[in-house]
Image (cartoon, rainbow, N blue to C red):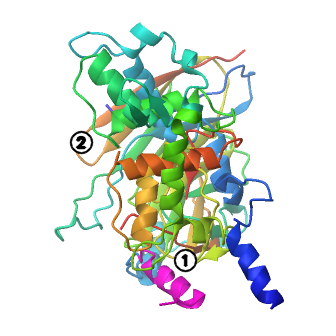
Amino acid sequence: MKRWIAAICLLAMPAWAQAPKISSFELMKPETQAMQRDDASNPAMLWIAEGRQLWSQKAGASNQSCADCHGDVASLRSVALRFPAFNAAQGNVVTLDQQIQICRTQAQKAEPWALETRPLLALSALIGLQSRGLPLQSVTAAEVATVEQGRALFMERRGQMNLSCAQCHDDHDGKSLGGATIPQGHPTGYPLYRLEWQDLGSVERRLRNCMVGVRSEPYAYGSPEMVALETFLRDRAAGLPLETPAVRP
Amino acid sequence: MASVLINVPKLVRKGETIEIKTLISHPMETGFRSASDGKLIPRDIIHRFVCTFEGTEIFFADLFPAISANPFIAFTMRAERSGTLTFRWLDDKGGAQVETARLDVQ
Amino acid sequence: MHLSRRTVLTGLVCALSVRPVQATPDLMEAAIAAFAKGRAMKPGRVRLDLPPLVENGNAVPLTVSVESPMTQEDFIARVALFNEKNPQPNIAIFHLTPLAGRASVSTRIRLGDSQFITAIAETNKGELFVTKAELVVTLPACAEN
């Protein structure tokens, strides 16, 4: 009888809900942590260098660069912490990458960059870098509905494995899966250089990997499901410092 | 032109041995991978990295497909005088990327 | 249908990507022999700094360093790295000069499987020193394919 009560209690809340939130940085080997810490050896910094060039590149019918409107990119400090965010003009919640697309098409009147393309990721990483070390923020009232949509997706069983995100990342975080330790799954470092990709990628790319991992159909980039998941995950991670651009295995 | 990061320490004293760190954006395609159609993706790597200081070669590396993508190479140099460091990455297609950095010795 | 935890975890482990590799310990021996050219290889002096447990075989940080005064009269001229289980046995050959100050090079390498790495240092006089290191390579969870 006691065993059932304990089991029900364990199922009812994530194991770490009473314990501190832990970034997956803490689970990495010292060598991989060192790779992230040293800006002179972090491969993601190659994309940052490209992002800086793009920041001052004039583009589109407007012939404006990001700098022409925003000035120095350092002025965007703390911006990345509040994304995904409700965009009043769009009438829905958008991710930082989608917001950059909006700036490019509407403000610069330039050709859009598709999601997950290199220039878009480079700028997203550059903007994220301006908030490195600052704590991720909880959502505002305008994003609450999207968080709840994301929570439902997080709890939903999916795929051939019939697993939900919560079953691994809430219930079994810290335990081993093959040779890897299951993280709590906080998106503190995106876009990041994943050693598995040998490339810089967004949280959506990583979520697609998770879905393939449980043998479920991955959601498309920028889909409402992805935006909802990203919004939920950011709110769930609130308080953890941003690490962009991170390195992960 | 691939993105490159070169890190040369500042405030270097004469006679000090410094570490120079380099990173270049390159897929280092091994030639052992297959595309989704089953065809082998041809090898395309940076096969040589050379560093010269004021025209004198101080370090070079022969690289093979076992070197990771976006190659990171760090090596050391005894700093005797100020001058220009030149870095050269040579790839399988016959291309060469050349970058320079300043070494200031006090 | 209720899946036991063991079934689920076994299924997930199988779902992790498996990288095919060609075992080449003979090729490595041949590559080392070609480098050594019949000279004896002595132990000592060479140090390989590698993580014993590798998180991802795509980018393994490696530092090879060799004890040497690095003077005009006595310096390390070349350091060669070999592997035994990747499709081909060579990793890199570093060429140093006395201007290096010390013999130490860092890079990141690819390892397709758990295996031994061999490092051989050659002095300007043609003397060879060798060391080996064993690495265990694990696969990350939830890969792209």
Q: Quadrant of residue A10?
A: bottom right
Q: Residue at x 24, y 17 (%)?
A: A109
Give me the disc on residue B94.
2
Q: Are marks 1 and 2 on the same chain?
A: no
Q: Is residue B69 visible?
A: no
Q: Residue at x 62, y 17 (%)?
A: B82
Give me the disc on residue C60.
none
A161 displayed left or right of C39: left
Whether C111 is among the magenta residues is no
Callout 1, which amino acid? Ser
Q: Mark 1: give few (<14), some (14-19) or many (20+) Cα within 10 Å.
A: some
Callout 2, which amino acid? Gly
**Residue that carries the numbered disc 1 in the rendered image:** C114
Where disc 1 sits, the SS reads: loop
Marks 1 and 2 sit apart, C-alpha to C-alpha, by 33 Å
Whether C3 is among the magenta residues is yes
* Main secondary structure type of the part rendered in magenta: helix
What chain letter is assigned to the residue under label 2?
A: B
Residue A202 x/y as whole percent: 44, 46
Q: Residue at x 38, y 74 (%)?
A: A215
Nearer-the-camera pick, B15 or C16: C16
**Region in magenta:** C1-18
Camera-near label (1 vs 2) is 1
Where disc 2 sits, the SS reads: loop
